[in-house]
Image (cartoon, coloured by chain):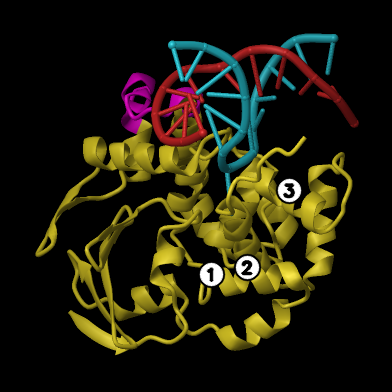
Chain colours: A yellow, B cyan, C red
Amino acid sequence: MNIIPLKNYNLEDTLIGGQSFTWRKDGDTYIGFTSKKVIVLKENNGSLEWQTFPENNDLDFVVEYLRLNEPYEEIMKEIQKDEYVEAAIKEFPNLRILKQDFELTLLTFLISANNSIKSIRRSVNLMAEKFGEKVQTPFGEVSLFPSTETITNLTIEELRSCSLGFRAKYLKASAQHLIDTKLSDRIHQMPEEEVRKELMAMQGVGPKIADCIMVFALGYESITPMDVWGKRILTEFYGQPENMKYDEMRNWIKDYFEGKGAWAGQFLFEYIRTRPQKKLAK
DNA sequence: TCGCAGGGCCGGT
DNA sequence: ACCGGCCCTGCG
């Protein structure tokens, strides 16, 4: 294992939260995968022990994936605009946003539609175990997420065997779309509105999933994906009307957090979705 | 047990 | 611009 300094970084909440579905915790070790790599992380006395497989020692990848060079304390100051954000930061200190692979993020968030995080994880792991390459590590054999190419060659029935339900056809179609359009080679150098348009051209990608891809893979910091929890944040915390449309919600919170909506939203999301169920009084 | 909700989207009106 | 339906799983 390699060792680098680690400051203000909560691996648990960041890796095992709602932004990535390919991590598990084994004792005090975090094991994650993409479609190409296995990453092993362990925190130890303010240091990060890490290794990548099958290619070892890929420091550049780890630094970019974990976004280790973010001016984190500065960002935290910028988003503390009210009591709700403050409470969320207190409950999830040092929560971070990852920068994940574009195609992996797209394909796994396709699975998120009308689904629960637990079930999304289950489907992603089933896909890896059934159809992904295997990588041998000192921490055991790890299955990678199937490549985009592999997914295009699977049948709908094979995909459905991973508990994907109606999303199976979206995975196959969108994987094929990625191959046909080579979108991954172009997406990183496009204006925001064009990125969103390209993403939503794919089957199964609507405004919310497009926002997730832009925040968790493409590094857009001003966007807050507005799911059922985001809507609750707006209505319960900020007194906004129930009937706001998606774009109205996104614009409202984007303006409110002045360019840092992704960070603030991540705290508020974890905060509201894990809060104890309110007893329905009366 | 069973009814419902889950990091929404699609297709018909 | 609305809205019913959707595969399946986890949870109370």
Q: Secondary structure at mark 1?
A: loop
Visible residue check, residue A33: yes
* Callout 2 amino acid: Ala
What separation in Å lies between label 1 and label 3 (alpha carbons)?
Answer: 19 Å
Give yes or no for residue A247 being in the magenta stretch.
no
Q: Are marks 1 and 3 on the same chain?
A: yes
What separation in Å lies between label 3 and label 2 (alpha carbons)?
Answer: 15 Å
Give the mark nearer the N terminus: 3 vs 2: 2
On the rendered image, what quadrant is the N terminus of chain A found in? Answer: bottom left
Extent of the magenta region: A153-167
* Callout 1 amino acid: Phe
Residue drawn where x is 77% and y is 76% of the image: A81
Mark 2: few, some, or many residues within 10 Å (few <14, many ≥20)?
many
Mark 1: few, some, or many residues within 10 Å (few <14, many ≥20)?
some
Task: Please tell me the numbered disc located at residue A92.
Answer: 1
User: Horizontally, is C1 left or right of A111 in the view?
Assistant: right
* Callout 3 amino acid: Arg
Residue bearing mark 2: A88
Give the mark nearer the N terminus: 1 vs 3: 1
Q: Are marks 1 and 2 on the same chain?
A: yes
Where does the image place residue A232, in percent across and percent down from the top left?
A: 73, 48
User: Horizontally, is A169 left or right of A59 in the view?
Assistant: right
Q: Secondary structure at mark 3?
A: helix
